Image (cartoon, rainbow, N blue to C red):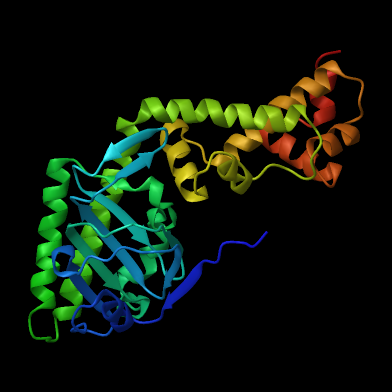
Amino acid sequence: MQKDHIQTVRVETIAKSHQLLGIEKPKHPLFSIQRFEHIKQVSLSERLRLSTNFYQIVLKKDCPGKLQYGQTIYDFDEGVMSFFAPRQVSILEPGEVLARSGWLLNVHPDFIRTSSLGKKMKDYAFFEYAVSEALILSADEENAIETIFLQIEKEYNLPIDTFSQDVVISNIELLLTYCNRYYHRQFITRKASNSELMNKVENVLNIWFTHPDHEGLPTATFLASQLNLSVKYLSDCLKQLTGQTAQQIIHDKLIEHAKDMLSTSALSVAEIAYMLGFDYPQSFNKLFKNKTNQTPVEFRQSFN
């Protein structure tokens, strides 16, 4: 059977991005801001794999479509924000069209490289979230975000002077700080669906540890793939919900199963370590001692 061919488009420069969108050349080679109202609407006839060499911050409004967030479908009645890091791959589907209104902000890493923001970009985990994990804004939040976009646009259209880059970078940092705040709000307000997520996490890990037909230990990447989430989003969501990262939750569940095996079976510590997925019993002993302040042997002896 012949596999469907997906065309890959690699956008090296912001100027190339403008060319593909059919808009005028950027006023700065490393930074640009555009309104979707000024971008010609195009509809794809086939799937497209897209990757850029720069950051993209997108606010979509009045978009003809719906967004799935977790198990819930949302209309684009309110603003939806997405964030793309350099070299991140996006899949555009046939028939997919741009938002009718909103903003597209392009920022090359070199534009912010020597600034404090450049050093902080790795802390904004939402640049590694999947599109389905977009930020859904309330009306007040959308107004606050648009105010910053307008300020960036105003600066973009002014003649460049000594302060231009600093002013733009300060506004981008303010924008990302607000987005960080709003994502934390989103985690809290969607706590019910996030609690359901926690149940799914528990189920995936219980199946892993009770059916030892696998090699190695479960990882955050494995857990995220089972739940159809990005690793960063899963860890941030669990951190907000439980105060623990995905890896910490995996370790706690592992220790829970280890305790059951140590207290109810005659298996040796080494056998239990191998069954849980450790390559070396010493690694199991170290983790167990770190989590419980007891060695596996000491824990087992406490039941005798």
Quadrant containing the C terminus is top right
Q: Residue furthest front?
A: 1
Q: Is residue 62 left or right of 115 when viewed as pictured? A: left
Q: Nearer the viewer, residue 80 or 294?
A: 80
- Image coordinates of residue 253 in percent, x first then y, are 65, 30
| Residue 252 against residue 10 in the figure, above or below | above
Residue 216 seen in this snapshot: yes
Quadrant containing the N terminus is bottom right
Q: Residue at x 8, y 85 (%)?
A: 159
Quadrant in the rendering for residue 31: bottom left
Quadrant in the rendering for residue 150: bottom left
- Image coordinates of residue 300 in percent, x first then y, are 83, 21
- Image coordinates of residue 85 in percent, x first then y, are 40, 65
Q: Nearer the viewer, residue 107 or 291?
A: 107
Q: How many marks?
A: 0
Residue 292 seen in this snapshot: no
- Image coordinates of residue 228 in percent, x first then y, are 52, 43
Q: Residue at x 46, y 70 (%)?
A: 87
| Residue 194 against residue 100 in the figure, above or below | above
Q: Residue at x 27, y 57 (%)?
A: 176
Q: Is residue 53 left or right of 281 when viewed as pictured? A: left
| Residue 181 against residue 104 in the figure, above or below | above
Q: Is residue 100 left or right of 242 when viewed as pictured? A: left
